[in-house]
Amino acid sequence: MPNPAPVGCNAAAAHADVLDLNNDGQPDVRRFFGTDNGQEFVQCKLSDLDGDGRWDVAKIYAPSGKVTTEMVDLDFDGVVDQVTHP
């Protein structure tokens, strides 16, 4: 079963945007924004590294911009292999 989107990486976000970094017409990065004390910040970023349409790296951010959690699918099988809390 593919990884579900982490908390904060969903429709509950204030808004989201999609980036196509390699111009192939497919989303490579999805950023989800939240607000804290009236200030907007990136609360989550999902990256598709192998172009299969599933996220391979998920980063959760604090309002300060610090990464609080990083989840990585190292072998691109749709299952999180590594979780760190830097």
Image (tube, helix red, strand yellow):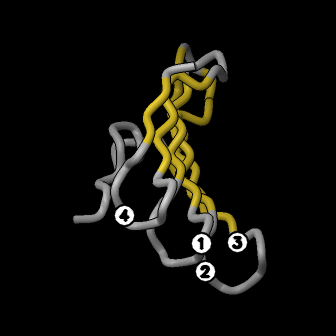
Asked if marks 3 and 2 touch (Cβ < 8 Å), the reply is yes
**Residue to which mark 3 is pinned:** 20
Spatial CA span between label 3 and label 2: 6 Å
**Picture disc at residue 50:** 1
Asked if marks 3 and 4 touch (Cβ < 8 Å), the reply is no
Mark 2 crowd level (few <14, some 14–19, many ≥20, 10 Å Cα): some
Give left or right: position of 17 versus 76. Answer: right
**Residue to which mark 2 is pinned:** 26
- Nearer the observer: mark 3 or 4; the answer is 4
Q: Residue at x 56, y 57 (%)?
A: 30
Quadrant assignment for the N terminus: bottom left
Asked if marks 1 and 3 touch (Cβ < 8 Å), the reply is no
Q: Residue 55 placed where, x, y %?
A: 48, 60
Q: What's the amino acid at mark 2?
A: Gln
Q: Where, by quadrant of the figure, is residue 4 drawn?
A: bottom left
Quadrant assignment for the C terminus: top right
**Residue to which mark 4 is pinned:** 78
Q: Residue at x 47, y 65 (%)?
A: 76
Q: Earlier in the sequence, mark 1 or mark 3?
A: 3
Between residues 34 and 56, which one lies in front from this camera angle? 56
Q: Earlier in the sequence, mark 3 or mark 4?
A: 3
Q: Earlier in the sequence, mark 4 or mark 1?
A: 1
Q: Where, by quadrant of the figure, is residue 37 drawn?
A: top right
Q: Residue 12 placed where, x, y %?
A: 34, 43
61 relative to 20, above or below: above
Mark 3 crowd level (few <14, some 14–19, many ≥20, 10 Å Cα): few
Asked if marks 4 and 2 touch (Cβ < 8 Å), the reply is no
Residue sticking out furthest to the right: 22
